[in-house]
Amino acid sequence: MDTSSSSRRIGVVGYGHLGQYLVQRILRDGPAHGLTLAFVWNRNSDRLRDCVPAELVLTDLSSFAERRCDVVVEVCHPQIVRDFGLRFLSQAHFMVGSPSALSDPDVNQQLRQASQQHGRTLYVPSGALWGGQDIQRLSDSGSLKALFIRMSKHPSCFRLTGDVLSGWTEDEGRRVLFRGSVAELCPLAPNNVNTMAAAAVAAGTTLGFSGVQGEIVSDTALRDYHVVEVEATGPDGFSVHTVRRNPAKLGAVTGSATYNSFWNSLLFCEGHGGRVYLC
Ligand SMILES: NC(=O)c1ccc[n+]([C@@H]2O[C@H](COP(=O)([O-])OP(=O)(O)OC[C@H]3O[C@@H](n4cnc5c(N)ncnc54)[C@H](O)[C@@H]3O)[C@@H](O)[C@H]2O)c1
């Protein structure tokens, strides 16, 4: 669809915390920003009843193209990116809320190719990442030598696939759970490493998922916020170190500021050609 003159039609895939937030914002604030809701899909559509106008509920995701979207937003699960990402890009720009899916080199390459082939943009929201576009510029100019991201959270805020965090106690303080490449980290903590995955996409031309290093830290002192630290290293002694405190409720995987960050990212999705774009 032509996005230049008419309102942009947004399809939202997933109706958990982020999906509910985005749907409500599009319904409330979308018209003022030229956005309208084309559909909402959730694997359990009962959850949408009484929350979303019936005509906007999509029951079969395979028929999403009938809703003629300009942008499809995934806020669901990396599996949906793997299963539907190529189809979304064949019809619309695609904002991938679960960029940890791109840690699989095949998925990464296929989505980049589809984006080029169809002239649609694969948007990666920066989420809780500070300075993503600076990292991307440093990488694209070939000057990024190393990148390290540390995410520290209260243990109740982690959703890990293994039992590395079992048996934690409230008085145990700080514990490094894992340190390694973002490629190794993504399967271990797919819901906690999206910020690192966004950084790996930003550094895609130099370091990528296997070159960017990450660390996840459990810290029982962090009852009110998550901490995201980024250390970027360039040539001749150049370095940047940022520390972001992201207010978050106890047990929350996603920091409060990340919701608004997603909305701002969505406003950017106007079409930037067939490429990956950090927004
Ligand atoms: N990019 C970022 O900075 C960032 C920040 C927060 C969350 N995320 C990611 O965005 C996604 C949504 O986050 P959320 O906080 O809204 O999560 P959530 O758990 O609140 O909601 C996820 C929704 O997807 C559904 N779902 C889960 N697994 C599914 C599957 N395999 N197939 C189909 N549906 C499935 C759930 O039923 C739920 O409705 C997650 O993948 C999360 O990791 C990314």
Image (cartoon, rainbow, N blue to C red):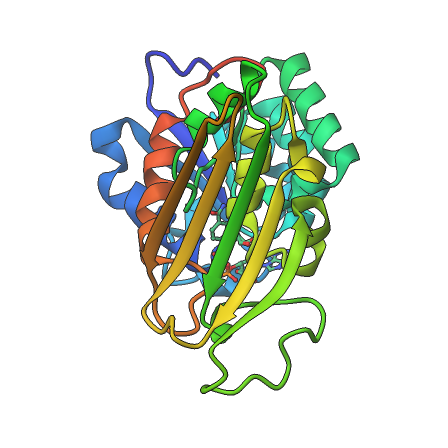
Q: Is residue 252 above or below residue 53?
A: below
Of residues 14 and 79, the one nearer the viewer is 79
Q: Say whether residue 199 is left or right of residue 53.
A: right
Give residue 147's position: percent from left, percent from top: 56, 37
The C terminus sits in image quarter: top left
List the single residue furthest toward the right. 106
Give residue 271's position: percent from left, percent from top: 45, 18
In the image, what residue occupies the spot 34% across and 40% down? 263
List the single residue furthest toward the front. 237
- Answer yes or no: is residue 148 visible: yes
In the image, what residue occupies the spot 59% across and 16% down? 142
Rendering quarter of residue 197: top right
Q: Say whether residue 197 is left or right of residue 69.
A: right
In the image, what residue occupies the spot 53% across and 64% down? 217
Quadrant for ligand 1 reads bottom right
In the image, what residue occupies the spot 39% across and 61% down? 226
Of residues 198 and 76, the one nearer the viewer is 198
Number of numbered callouts drawn: 0
Q: Say whether residue 210 is left or right of residue 228.
A: right
Give residue 241's position: percent from left, percent from top: 41, 41
Give residue 236's position: percent from left, percent from top: 51, 21
Q: Is residue 82 above or below residue 48?
A: above
Q: Say whether residue 279 is left or right of residue 192.
A: left
